[in-house]
Structures are given as C-alpha cells and as structure tokens.
Image (cartoon, rainbow, N blue to C red):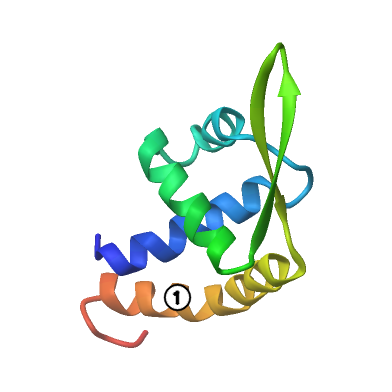
Amino acid sequence: MDIQLKRGLLDVCVLAAIQNEDSYGYKIIKDMKPYVEMSESTLYTILKRLETSNMLTVRTSEHDGRLRKYYHITKLGLLRLEAFKEEWSEVMSIYQFVIGGGKNE
C-alpha cells in the first residue's frame, strides 16, 4: 500500500479509537487490533504527529504507581474524522474503478 495513503488511514484510525473517550497507548493498540495491526513505535509516531497537528492533546496521570499518558481528541481531530467520512465515498468510487479494471460500470 502506498505509504502516504496508509499513513493517512492510520492517523484517522487512531483518532477514531479515541473519539469517544480518552485513552492510552496500549489500549489504543488493543482496541484497533481487530481491524489494524500496529506496532507501538508506529503508534507513538502517529500520536506525536497528531499532537503536533493539534488534533489531540496529552495529559499525564498516575496509574498503579506509574505515569501514563492519556490522549484526548480535539475539535480539529473531530473535524478531520468528519472530513474523512465525507471523503470515503470518493475513495470507494476510486476502489470500484480500480477493481473493475478501469471501466465504469
């Protein structure tokens, strides 16, 4: 898969994983596992990129005597998710064109 396309899809997957509640790295990976396999190093690169893009914020909290980072989706992150949902019909149209051998049905 094209690296740029995959990168964009993984970003949206991470945003979707935290859209309903704040979460932390291990739980994000666990929640996404039925749909997408992702290493910790890939996840933390994505989380840092999304934080830099102001699509999520980070807070640190103590859990079982250790500090844990919790990620929270921002309004900008929610807007990105909505934009992705609107773009999806175009992606599916392109997919149908490609699997149809370049012919419109």
Percent coordinates x, y for residue 27 in the rendering: 61, 29
Residue most toward the bottom?
A: 104
> Which image quarter is the C terminus in?
bottom left
> Looking at this view, is 41 or 99 the one in front?
41
Residue at image coords 73%, 19% = 63
> Looking at this view, is 53 or 66 the one in front?
66
Residue at image coords 54%, 53% = 13
In the rendered image of this protein, does residue 67 appear above or below residue 74? above
> Which image quarter is the N terminus in?
bottom left
Is residue 42 rendered to the left or right of residue 69?
Answer: left
Percent coordinates x, y for residue 57 in the rendering: 69, 55
In the rendered image of this protein, does residue 101 appear above or below residue 104? above
Disc 1 packing (10 Å; few <14; some 14–19; many ≥20): few
Percent coordinates x, y for residue 24 in the rendering: 63, 35
Is residue 19 rendered to the left or right of residue 2?
Answer: right
In the rendered image of this protein, does residue 83 appear above or below residue 58? below
Is residue 22 rendered to the left or right of residue 16?
Answer: right
| Residue under pointer 1 | 91
Percent coordinates x, y for residue 66 in the rendering: 65, 18
Q: Amino acid at mark 1?
A: Val
In the rendered image of this protein, does residue 14 appear above or below residue 91? above
Please, what secondary structure does the residue beneath circle 1 have? helix
Residue at image coords 73%, 52% = 19
> Looking at this view, is 43 or 51 the one in front?
51
> Looking at this view, is 104 or 9 the one in front?
9
Q: How many marks?
A: 1
Is residue 42 rendered to the left or right of residue 49?
Answer: left
Residue most toward the left?
A: 101
Residue at image coords 63%, 72% = 80
